[in-house]
Image (cartoon, rainbow, N blue to C red):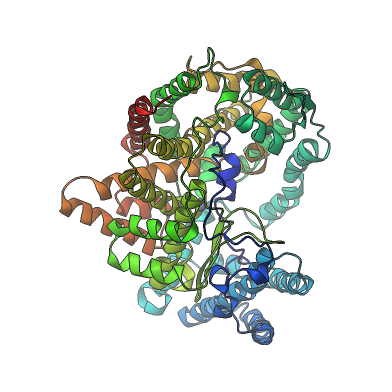
Amino acid sequence: MPRRTPLLRTLCATAAVLALSAAAFPGLAAEGDKPATRVRGEIPAEYRWDFTAIYANWAAWDADMQRMEALMADFGKLQGSLKKGPAALLKAYQTMDEIGKLQTKLYAYPQLQKDADGRDQEVAGRFQRALAVFARFDAASAWFQPELLTLPQAKVKAWLAATPALKPYAFGITDSFRKQAHVLDAKGEQLLSLAGPVGRASMNAYDELSTSDIKFPTLTTSDGQSVLLSPGNYQGLLAKNANQADRAKAAAAHVGTYGAQANTYAAIYAGILQRDWFNAQARKFPTTLDAALSDNNVPRSVVETLVATTRAGTAPLQRYARLRKQLMGLGEYHLYDSSRPLFASSESYPYKKALGLVLESVAPLGEDYVQRYKKFMTGGRIDVYENEGKRSGAYSAGVYGVGPFQLLNYNDTMDAAFVLAHEGGHAMHTVLAYETQPYSTAEYTIFVAEVASTTNERFLLETLLKKTTDPKERFLLLQHAVDSIIGTFYTQVLFADFELQAHQLVEKGEPVTTEVLNKLYAGLLKTYYGDAVTVDDFYQWTWARIPHFFHSPYYVYQYATCFASSAQLFKGMTTGTEEAKKAATARYLNMLKAGGSDHPMAELKQAGVDLTQRATVQAVVDQLDALVSQMEVEAAKIPR
Ligand SMILES: [Zn+2]
């Protein structure tokens, strides 16, 4: 199947946005090796990306651009040739691989430079040029997939069996035929493609209403300050403002802004649900969930088990809320109290120290992993510190044939150290997959991606806990882990639960009104938080402020399944007999090396994770339970 225009992976950004309850715990301003300057040229080269690993200079980029144009012309000439036999099919796939590899490099070279400093106009111009050429190739290669699927499947199967050189493409080819069951005839596909823009209308309306047209109120806090309650300021206020009455007013006013237009939001959301149900029925899926999971070949029971097990496992979530309530000395604990830091950290994590800790933490993954990681860390592949014009956040992006590149905005805090571990997990997944897999099966899916990152975060936590005896610092480490379980697991399952039920309303032909959606959301908050948290009425409108519901339905559950997988894998690699641990680690590394060579569920299964089983999800519940117990122990030791 023709690879789509390679867009560099920018994982994680979404997870951070979604972690509604994840609080920021800025440590004290730290003395470290963080440069005082924000001028990129003044930051030592060892902390900046070395782009020469991709191209020596723009002349080399230009030369490859020309090679790419020639290959695109060659590929066009192959149209109509596939029926000639396995040699012709192989030629088409190999040409596509060549084009794909070039595209990745041609894209990454300007893209990474743009992210490092977005103000360079020459870079921006070349980036646009690359995108235009790729779009042209997407259009010029659209013939390939339909032509492949006109070949009888049995014939292609025989070709695959008789032609070892086609092996790297076997998974993609077989999967195309699997998906064929839901592809309509030419007339049907044309109708669906005409309906595409109609299906996006609701999402566009949401974006305008929730960004362009929204007017956030201004709140005067108890100390006389005036704060415009935009999403960023609002989150900041919840974390920083020590006055509960201020937090209460801010939450009512911020969430209430969405509530004031709840009927419009509900009508828009109903449009999204109707679109999903239209597409599912048109493509002959029994439910919207089946349609959404089909691409990754994930069975419906995965989401259903996830939701059911989590609903039954909310006790530790509620215990954590009670612990917070007690430590904050509050009479009533509300949702808007969940972002306040409980203690300030006095520990700082300068970059080099954090690198050492992260490297040490992955020792259980074996000497080979550690050596490769070390090589990655020192090879000009991590852009460490912020500078003027650099994009915010953190990500890891792979360039096949070259390796991963990692962007950070490192600021010496504990959070930054965990981000370093997280992105390192992605980067090493890429290193191992690229080394093992041919281009056609090297890219792993989102479904498994966050397994590697959260596993490495867990390893770092373990190492830091071993080294820290101060109860306050131990408490903060445990809290970091707990907050990330709540942000990437519980909150996402609650969202998935909501989406599932909302879609089912439409599937059953029941009305989707503001009242129905409010009741659904408020009911879920009650189910998850019980009486440990006082849930104010205005939180019933929260669904209207979750962009994922409107942008990418049935997406967020993947954060939770990744988290559950990683919890189980970590347990396997760190408990039991030496022999069992070794075997679990080998299976885990094999999963990383598998890249995108199989469906994600199959990859996880060979690593020992079966997401259709309740026990897999229960591992997260158990992990949270253990962490909260440890927090209770440490909290009792902290002088107050
Ligand atoms: Zn990530």
Looking at the picture, tell me which residue is in the foreground, 329 or 298: 329
Q: Is residue 404 left or right of residue 366?
A: right
Q: Is residue 411 left or right of residue 593?
A: right
On the image, which quarter does residue 211 sit in?
Answer: top right
On the image, which quarter does residue 365 sit in?
Answer: bottom left
Q: Residue at x 56, y 42 (%)?
A: 26
Q: Residue at x 60, y 70 (%)?
A: 144
Q: Is residue 272 visible?
A: yes
Residue 404 at x, y percent in the picture = 50, 67
Q: Residue most toward the top? A: 331
Q: Residue at x 46, y 50 (%)?
A: 418
Residue 140 at x, y percent in the picture = 69, 73
Q: Residue at x 38, y 56 (%)?
A: 357
Q: How many marks?
A: 0
**Would you place residue 449 above or below residue 2 in this image?**
above
**Would you place residue 129 above or below residue 603 in this image?**
below
Looking at the picture, tell me which residue is in the foreground, 299 or 452: 452
On the image, which quarter does residue 590 sit in?
Answer: bottom left
Q: Is residue 531 left or right of residue 512?
A: left
Residue 635 at x, y percent in the picture = 38, 27
Residue 194 at x, y percent in the picture = 75, 51
Looking at the picture, tell me which residue is in the foreground, 460 or 20: 460
